[in-house]
Image: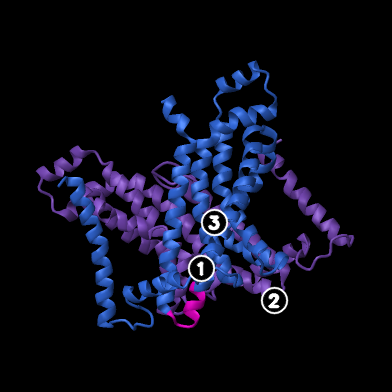
Chain colours: A blue, B purple
Amino acid sequence: MSKAGWTRIAAFGFALSLILAWQVLADLRLISPIFFPSPARAAAVLVARFADGSIWTPLVATGLRMLFGWLLASLIGILIGAAIGSSRITRLLLEPTLEFLRPLPASAMIPVAVLFLGLSNAMSLSVIAFGAIWPVLLASVHGFSTVQPELRQVSDVLGFGRGAFLRKIALPSALPDIMAGLRVSLAISLILAVVTEMQASLPGLGWEIFYAQRVYRSPDLYAGLILLGVMGYCANHLLMRFESRMLRWRKTKL
Amino acid sequence: MGRLAIGSILPILFLLVWEAANRTGVLTLESLSRPSDILVAGVAGLRDGSILLATVQTFETALLGLAIAAIAGILVGAILGLSPVLERITGPTIESLRPIPAVAFMPLVLMMFGFGISMEATIVAYACVWPILIVTISAVQAIEPRLLEVADVLEMPVTDRLRKIVFPSAFARINVGLRVATGIALVVAVTVEIVLNPRGLGYSLVLAQQSLNVGAMYAQLLWLCVVGYVLNAIIRNAGPGAPVTFWRPVQ
């Protein structure tokens, strides 16, 4: 077998041996099984919940929350980013304020959002949007402000107006930057979806984990953690595939 | 006109309109307070020391978690960076653990440690270890191979090799990861305090909101902005390595 094949088997073996070590440690009962259930029990919970279909409601709820919050952040982020990146005046007016707001942990907006919107989905979405906007925004500002001067001249020669320039030239040229920002934003969206669910008792995986701890059902808790990991992993991979599809034109250029 | 002056036009206008709208009775939402009350609440909080105490609590936890993450991340990262085989074997496991949001561990860690500094620091450490680990691996892999050949010729033991060759030459890049992690540490610490842990800035923010002490709530939010801004200004250029941009995962 090839060397790469062996490493792959070894990598699989490493992951497997960690899970086995977890199982052995749990069976030895060094730590109370209340906190530290065996992986077999966590897996059993997963299988049972997938079998009776009760896992789909929270899974879909968290997924949609993440998706809509992310879309909102992306839309606003790209729009503001385009405005700042392509106009010196908006940049001067807005940048200091944004620089001041950016380091604020998004979760700190939860109390404010709760005051205005209550313990609702709108609260959750606005907090996700606030937190997830920064990577897209900074990336779009960077992308839109570094459009090559030659491209700008081309658009002048072709007699493009401002709108056409932004849509047909600046946006595609900023897209690689924006896509990289979008991926970071997606990861943040999942985190904030979980946090807002815990804080506001909104339905979803975050709340399920929280609840499992309250009633000391730790296998459920671990099952929820595993699912969240899978979700983050899948979301990132889907977006990476989408990214390489959207940016196919770049490869032909190089 | 300076950049700062132009940049402060909009916020000042916003505050003036807010204050005026509230004073004239156009806008009297209970959730809004008004800028002058926020200022008063902020000064009161700073003078009686409650805000500073909360800041110290948050920072000591964030730093503890960061220290744990730095030690673990740099050590493991150096080993994996030196051994490509080990890196490829552990890679998939690391990649599948990394996307689990650190905050999702809150209930689990709460069961293990109860409330207090150790549960919060654990979650901060989990969140911070990944950027440090990944940057360290790539930093160590980027070390000039001839330096490592010198170590081979000198028959250095592993500890000497790490101390005398690996860390000095990889430090500038590792430092970038450390600075990214510092930003994450503060955010995660505040998040844990808001959701769960009754101490620090996050908790006092939630407390102010839940007791409808709106002025104090906004004052603390502003304080968090200031603290985060100062911290960012420090870490953006602290020590060797490229300036940190927070949106782009460091390669």
Neighbours of disc 2 within 10 Å: few (<14), some (14-19), many (20+): few
Residue A232 belongs to the span the image colors magenta: no
**Do badges 3 and 1 share one subunit?**
yes
Q: Badge 1 is on which residue?
A: A205
Foreground mark, 3 or 2, reads: 3
Chain under numbered label 3: A
Magenta residue span:
A209-217
**Residue beneath disc 3:** A189
Q: Are marks 3 and 2 on the same chain?
A: no
Residue highlighted by disc 2: B211
Q: Residue at x 65, y 59 (%)?
A: B222
Front: mark 2 or 1 = 1
Quarter of the picture holding the C terminus of chain B? top left
Read off the chain for label 2.
B
How far is mark 2 from mark 1, CA to CA? Answer: 29 Å
Residue at the image point whose x is 71% and y is 35% from the top: B1
Amino acid type, mark 2: Ser
Discs 3, 1 touching: Cβ within 8 Å: no
Quick check: B136 above or below B217? Answer: above
The spot of residue A175 in percent (x, y) is 53, 36
